[in-house]
Image (cartoon, rainbow, N blue to C red):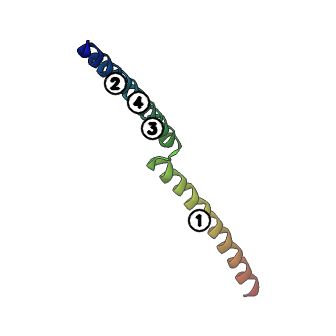
Amino acid sequence: MEMMVWNIVLTAVLAVMGFLLKGKFDEIERIGILLNKTREEVAREHITRAEVRADMESLKEHVDNRFNRLEEKLDSIMRGKA
């Protein structure tokens, strides 16, 4: 009889531990899925090197155009005074 009680107690303890461990493993799996989704979202928001180069080229052309206009204005002012 005493052996049966001991088996029941051990079975109950193992069942509770198994239940708690299963919950922890499920939580770890859920966190892993969320982490992967976050990685995908962050990667989607980042810019690629090609995009950076294209943007920098566009900016360079814009600045060059502004300087060319400024040079033309200065040249016309200098011609007017000369």
Residue 64, numbered label: 1
Residue 13, numbered label: 2
What is the quadrant of residue 71 in the picture? bottom right
Q: Is residue 80 left or right of residue 2?
A: right
Asked if the residues shown at circle 4 and circle 2 are in contact, with their CB atoms under 8 angstroms apart, the answer is no
Who comes first in sequence, dot 1 or dot 3?
3
Where residue 3 sits: x, y (%)? Answer: 23, 15
What is the quadrant of residue 13 in the picture? top left
SS at mark 4 in the image = helix
Q: Along the line of sight, which residue is nearer the eye, 64 or 9?
A: 9
Residue type (three-letter) at the residue carrying disc 2 = Val
Residue type (three-letter) at the residue carrying disc 1 = Asp
Q: Nearer the viewer, mark 3 or mark 4?
A: 4
Residue type (three-letter) at the residue carrying disc 3 = Leu
Q: Residue furthest front?
A: 1
Q: Distance from label 3 to label 4 (Cα)? A: 10 Å
**What residue is pinned by disc 4?**
29
Q: Distance from label 4 to label 2 (Cα)? A: 24 Å
How many C-alpha atoms fall within 10 Å of the one at disc 3: few (<14), some, or many (≥20)?
few
Q: Nearer the viewer, mark 1 or mark 2?
A: 2
Q: Nearer the viewer, mark 1 or mark 4?
A: 4
Relative to residue 51, is residue 37 depicted above or below? above
How many C-alpha atoms fall within 10 Å of the one at disc 4: few (<14), some, or many (≥20)?
few
Where residue 32 sits: x, y (%)? Answer: 41, 34
Q: Distance from label 2 to label 3 (Cα)? A: 33 Å
Who comes first in sequence, dot 4 or dot 2?
2
Q: Is residue 82 left or right of residue 55?
A: right
